[in-house]
Amino acid sequence: MASIKFDAFESWFRKPQNPIQPINLLSLTQSFLPTTSSNSPNFASISSSGFFSRKPKKPGLDSDKPGPYKQMVDQFFWECENLPDYRHTPEVEIFLNEDPFFENKENPTEDELKENEKWWQDFRGSPVVQFLARAEEIADEINRIELKENEEPFRKEDKKLWQAVPHVIGLDGRPMPRKAIKTREESDDKFWDFTKQFFFGLWGFRQRPYPPGRPIDVAQAIGYKRLEKRYYDFIMRSGGWYYKDRLGRTRGPCELITLKTAWGGGIIDKHTFIWGEDMDEWAPIHMVYGLEPAIATWEGLVRQQQLSFINFRRVYLPGFPLKGMRRKLINSFKKKQ
């Protein structure tokens, strides 16, 4: 017998047989992104299941062996520590002390000694050898005379500085003499040669040709002490100095008295970079001609001692180097390491 349904809304509230699934955002994003798998073959490659696939290597005994570059570095450090120093061995000393032209035999026979003595007599008796030996003696004497003639400059106040500068060794092994100005006329000629060449080049005029291999020694013509005094006077009159502090920041403009105060307080020293008028670039104070004597005067040193006493720090004597300015020895470097 068939059953009759009286509830007209029964089908509306019953659970459907195939309900709608909620949207899975994770699977949706993975469907748009390309899937990369380690087992998938490369693009346009023939996929073979097992014919060309390589088997993973088993970790053997050579897995911990360093690479070639690591071996080279290890060998370099080992050689630095273990290889002996051949610079002062007896073989090297013999090689350095032996004559480059003549062989010295250790146990010569009587015949060899007589032959050697006869050869030396013939060699010294040769007129060519005598001429060359006499030429060397004359060259040494001429060099000594030139050094003697140029040992004193024209200005007497520069004599100590002139003699303190060592001579440059020439290609022949002899010290090359520095040409000293002898007379006042020569000094004036040097000065006016430099002045004409400098101002004509500065103003765009045609210069008189001057040999480039022999530059004009205008510093000697003016005088080293005078030149330093002129730079000192220029520095005393100029203003607007800038210096770099320990953080690298530019400080300034400062007058000269401000730099003296900073020097006395230990804020700046001779290694501080400074810039002023007519300077092309930054330079340390001790490299600017005449600047360090203008800043580190005697009153500045006294001020530095006073500040040292006030701050209860160590008193640095005028001739005693500061902590960072002392000479470094090899033992001190070894202790630090």
Image (cartoon, rainbow, N blue to C red):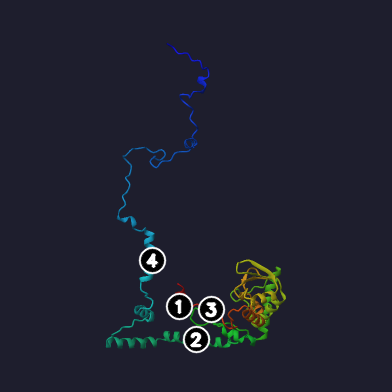
Answer whether residue 202 is visible to the viewer in this image: yes
Q: State if disc 1 and disc 4 touch (CB < 8 Å).
A: no
Q: Earlier in the sequence, mark 1 or mark 3?
A: 3
Q: Residue at x 32, y 86 (%)?
A: 116
Answer whether residue 289 is visible to the viewer in this image: no
Q: State if disc 1 and disc 2 touch (CB < 8 Å).
A: no
Whole-Å distance between the Cαs marked 1 and 3? 14 Å
Q: Which residue type does callout 4 highlight?
A: Phe
Give the percent coordinates (x, y) of residue 35: 44, 39
Give the percent coordinates (x, y) of residue 310: 63, 79
Whole-Å distance between the Cαs marked 3 and 2? 41 Å
| Above-or-below relation of 14 to 26 | above
Is 127 on the left-hand or right-hand side of 168?
left
For label 4, the residue is: 76
Local SS, label 4: helix
For label 3, the residue is: 326
Q: Residue at x 69, y 74 (%)?
A: 258
For label 1, the residue is: 331
